[in-house]
Amino acid sequence: YAKQTTNLENIPSPGMHLLNQATLIKPIAAKTPLSFTVWLKLRNKRSLDQLVSDIYDPHSPRYQHFLTADLYEQQFAPNKKIEEKIQRFFMEQGMQAEVRHHSIRVHGSAQQIAQALHVSMSYYRYQNEI
């Protein structure tokens, strides 16, 4: 079960306003298997954005000096320790979690996910689709 924590954080949902236009059908059954992907933030995003801009700017001294995989890993990719920490969190909740290309693919039951992430999950009908 999820460890109790006092530092919960609300993450804004860009689709939350759509939920107000949907019709609740029923909660998702606790044993329903679900999968989702946790995408991690890049490090030094501003520097990466500037580098990309410079690479394609003919007036920049970095014009067409393309980013190598090693440089991306060293300076911009999410930290391996953070990836492992998040993977371990989900595994400690009894779920399967695999790091893939700097994201974490998680498989678990609706109940496991709801307990770990402190959410409730239900089926809704929106524009004639469930």
Image (cartoon, helix red, strand yellow):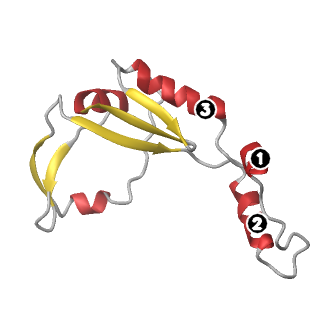
Q: Which residue is drawn at 47% across and 32% down?
A: 98
Q: How many marks?
A: 3
Helix, strand or loop under label 2: helix
| Residue 82 tag number | 3
Q: Where is residue 127 in the image (x, y as percent from the top left)?
A: 14, 68
Amino acid type, residue under disc 3 in the picture: Ile
Q: Mark 2 points at which residue?
A: 50
Question: Can you tell which quarter of the image residue 36 is in?
Answer: top left
- Compared across the picture, whether 11 is left or right of 101 comes to left
What is the CA distance from the residue labelled 3 to the residue labelled 1?
18 Å
Question: Of discs 3 and 1, which sits in the foreground?
Answer: 1
**Which one is earlier in the sequence, the residue at label 2 or at label 3?**
2
Q: Position of residue 74 (x, y in %)?
A: 77, 43
- Compared across the picture, whether 61 is left or right of 76 comes to right
Helix, strand or loop under label 1: helix
Amino acid type, residue under disc 2 in the picture: Gln
Q: Name the residue under label 1.
A: 70
Q: Position of residue 7 (x, y in %)?
A: 48, 29
